[in-house]
Image (cartoon, helix red, strand yellow):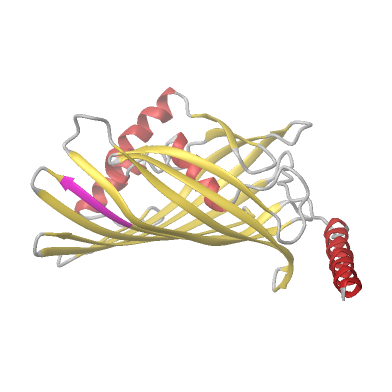
């Protein structure tokens, strides 16, 4: 009986050793952006935000659809793969629906005169369309530098008053994080890596920690792609002392999927969804908000 017990332990040990050895032998995949000097890319971002806000016995539902097209003009690529890119906005479409209010729609490609609020948006966007901002992106997809210039910086500050800070350096980092942060080393199926980013909001410091998990190569209509699952944790730190507002993140969810062409060194498609439940206290008011944001990004060759 003792011999059988000893043999059983030995067999289990051998199996564990074989499994461990098998994991070491798994094929690994290198995932990195392979920018080419002179390359021009079209980056398209579609974002939908749905919110429900309740104050006392009143509620307000709002839906914002935002579609952005950008041109990435690769000016230079260093030996370490760091790319210098001129990033310019070529088109923006916006739709805002809120309660019984009239829908606000805007399309920068439209030649008709925009009415009401859309006219204000058009006036803010006009000076920015087609104006390049210079960014530096490493092979992992991380922005390591943003150069706006004094004129464009001032124009973006005016735009932020209308559309928020979508084009601020922090926002650019956030946008590229939804595209995905790639691993520093080759990975095997099932391996994970993390990337975090922080940004200041009106309600406090927002920290987003994403976990990326390589799920292997998959056959799609676009050919073989590397699939990477996204999960994450969102934390909201209170605003500075002295602010009458106090925000608490009651619940949060973050998930997504990246399809990356490892051979071409370029994103095919990424999608991410965030769900937030926020409670904000302001003096005697208690405000409950449920916010869902879905973002889809595609990258392809740019054509005028």
Is 127 located above or below residue 226 in the figure? above
89 on left or right of 31: left
Residue nearest the observer in this picture, 115 or 298: 298
Q: Residue at x 48, y 37 (%)?
A: 131
> Residue 233 location in percent, x, y?
47, 52
Residue 37 in sight from this viewpoint: yes
Residue drawn at the location 57% of the way across and 34% of the way down = 135
The span shown in magenta is 277-281
Drawn side of residue 125 relative to residue 280, left or right: right
- Against 222, residue 262 (above or below) is above
What percent of the width, then of the height, locates residue 239? 28, 36
Q: Is residue 188 above or below residue 70?
A: below
**From this viewpoint, is residue 304 visible?**
no
Quarter residue 56 falls in:
bottom left
Q: Is residue 173 left or right of residue 243?
A: right
Q: Is residue 213 above or below residue 184?
A: below
Residue drawn at point x = 19 percent, y = 33 percent: 243
Q: Is residue 50 magenta?
A: no
- Image x and y of residue 102, in percent: 18, 64
Count of labels in the image: 0
Q: Is residue 278 highlighted in magenta?
A: yes
Magenta portion: prevailing SS class? strand
Query: In the rendered view of the protein, which quadrant contains the N terminus?
Result: bottom right
x 59%, y 44%: residue:
72
């Amino acid at each position: 009986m003792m011999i059988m017990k000893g043999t059983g332990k030995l067999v289990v040990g051998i199996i564990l050793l074989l499994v461990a050895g098998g994991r070491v032998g798994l094929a690994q995949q290198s995932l990195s952006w392979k920018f080419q000097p002179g390359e021009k890319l079209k980056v398209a971002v579609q974002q939908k935000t749905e919110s429900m806000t309740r104050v006392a016995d009143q509620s307000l539902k709002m839906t914002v659809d935002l579609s952005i097209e950008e041109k990435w003009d690769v000016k230079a690529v260093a030996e370490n793969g760091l790319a210098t890119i001129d990033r310019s906005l070529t088109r923006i479409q916006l739709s805002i629906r809120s309660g019984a209010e009239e829908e606000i729609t805007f399309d920068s490609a439209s030649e008709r005169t925009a009415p009401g609020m859309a006219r204000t948006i058009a006036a803010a966007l006009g000076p920015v369309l087609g104006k390049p901002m210079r960014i530096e992106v490493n092979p992992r997809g991380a922005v390591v530098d943003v150069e706006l210039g004094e004129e464009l910086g001032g124009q973006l500050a005016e735009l932020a008053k209308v559309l928020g800070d979508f084009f601020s350096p922090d926002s650019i980092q956030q946008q590229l994080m939804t595209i995905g942060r790639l691993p520093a080393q080759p990975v095997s199926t099932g391996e994970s890596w993390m990337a975090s980013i922080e940004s200041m909001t009106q309600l406090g410091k927002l920290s987003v920690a994403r976990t990326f998990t390589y799920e292997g190569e998959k056959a799609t209509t676009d050919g073989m792609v590397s699939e990477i699952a996204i999960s994450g944790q969102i934390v909201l730190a209170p605003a500075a002392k002295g602010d009458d507002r106090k925000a608490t993140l009651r619940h949060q969810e973050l998930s997504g999927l990246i399809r990356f062409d490892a051979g071409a060194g370029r994103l095919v498609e990424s999608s991410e969804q965030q769900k937030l439940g926020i409670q904000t206290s302001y003096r005697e008011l208690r405000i409950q908000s449920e916010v869902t944001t879905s973002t889809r990004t595609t990258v392809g060759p740019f054509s005028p």
